[in-house]
Image: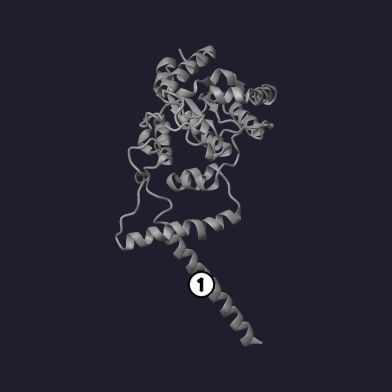
């Protein structure tokens, strides 16, 4: 009996030691890829590092724009700052990060006396894409606090998703092989953003407008309403002013789904506790002013929208 018990303890100890060595080995391998050095992230999401660096060094009160790529492509932050006399921070990145991520991110950035303008894409999902959020965390470790994950997701990321990617990076480093990097000098890259966080590069003069042919949108009650209202309560408690701004949208697609936009607007007017700065129709622009999706304005469109935003802010007595 003593021998059997001793052997069982030895077996369990061996299993625990083996599991520990596996976890340590995976962790060591993953360090080559996660978290990565900021300077090595030249892809579009790499701009999250620069946006936070700029936000951290900018004194409050600030106007902080929160949203997806409609914000990244859709405002001239310097022009707004010059017109209002208040520094502007553009946190807009990608709708795939989800509403939860965006609101948690701006909570971490905002300070008392700041002004937050939320401009999210229509029917933006709360959770977004998990892999995109993990990529943001890889680039900017602090982003890991902007979203939650289940234990199953954590185990899958640690032992499968991350390890597969990280093992190839480890081998490349061991054998001194050059790794494939991000394409340089393209619109969807880190260098396309200016210091304020605006996308200012548009190379293709004739971008594809196929998105106009494949657009779909059906009405449903916006599931993120409560998230926005919870954020309003947080802002009020922390002396932060918050507003809601409808995103830019192409004219032809708006006309196709006018009834959907009207119903969406009615819901927000009825249930959203954040003050609306405009109406969906106010943010409609000619199709020719969009780049390659329904939310990405070209520079001319960005300037038109910026002019509208400046007038809206003045109406709220924000700035000069």
Q: How is the image coloured?
A: one colour
Residue 202 placement (x, y as % from top left): 38, 30
Residue 55 placement (x, y as % from top left): 43, 31
Residue 32 placement (x, y as % from top left): 39, 56
Task: Locate the C terminus by quadrant.
Answer: top left
Write down the residue under mark 1: 18
Local crowd size for mark 1, using a 10 Å CA cut-off: few (<14), some (14–19), many (≥20): few
Q: Is residue 60 left or right of residue 180?
A: right
Question: Is residue 11 or residue 6 the one in the foreground?
Answer: 11
Task: Locate the N terminus by quadrant.
Answer: bottom right
Residue extending furthest toward the left = 176
**Residue located 42% across and 15% down the image:** 83
**Residue located 50% across and 48% down the image:** 134
- Vertical placement of residue 116 versus 144, above or below: above
Residue 212 placement (x, y as % from top left): 53, 30
- Vertical placement of residue 15 versus 68, above or below: below
- Vertical placement of residue 163 versus 213, above or below: below
Residue 267 in view (yes/no): yes
The image quadrant that residue 239 belongs to is top right
Q: Is residue 38 left or right of residue 95?
A: left
* Total marks placed: 1
**Residue located 37% across and 32% down the image:** 204
SS category of the residue bearing label 1:
helix
């Amino acid at each position: 009996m003593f021998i059997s018990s001793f052997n069982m303890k030895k077996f369990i100890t061996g299993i625990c030691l083996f599991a520990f060595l596996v976890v340590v080995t995976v962790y060591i391998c993953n360090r080559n890829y996660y978290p990565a050095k900021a300077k090595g992230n030249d892809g579009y999401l790499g701009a999250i590092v620069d946006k936070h660096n700029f936000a951290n060094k900018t004194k409050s009160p600030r106007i902080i724009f929160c949203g997806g790529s409609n914000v990244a492509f859709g405002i001239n932050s310097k022009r707004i700052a010059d017109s209002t006399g208040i520094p502007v921070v553009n946190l807009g990145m990608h709708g795939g990060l989800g509403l939860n991520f965006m609101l948690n991110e701006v909570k971490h950035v905002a300070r008392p006396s700041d002004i937050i303008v939320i401009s999210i894409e229509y029917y933006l999902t709360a959770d977004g894409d998990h892999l995109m959020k993990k990529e943001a965390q890889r680039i900017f470790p602090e982003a890991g606090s902007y979203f939650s994950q289940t234990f199953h997701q954590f185990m899958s990321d640690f032992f499968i998703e991350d390890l597969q990617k990280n093992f190839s990076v480890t081998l490349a480093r061991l054998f001194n092989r050059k790794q494939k990097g991000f394409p340089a000098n393209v619109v969807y890259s880190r260098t396309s953003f200016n210091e304020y966080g605006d996308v200012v590069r548009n190379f293709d003069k004739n971008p594809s407008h196929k998105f106009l042919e494949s657009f779909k949108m059906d009405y449903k009650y916006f599931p993120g309403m409560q998230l926005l209202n919870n954020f309003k309560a947080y802002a009020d408690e922390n002396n932060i002013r918050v507003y809601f701004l409808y995103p830019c949208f192409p004219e032809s697609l708006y006309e196709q789904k006018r009834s959907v936009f009207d119903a969406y607007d009615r819901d927000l007017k009825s249930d959203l506790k954040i003050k609306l700065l405009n109406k969906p129709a106010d943010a409609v622009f000619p199709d020719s002013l969009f780049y390659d999706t329904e939310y990405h304005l070209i520079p001319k469109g960005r300037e038109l929208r910026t002019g509208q935003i400046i007038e809206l802010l003045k109406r709220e007595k924000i700035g000069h």
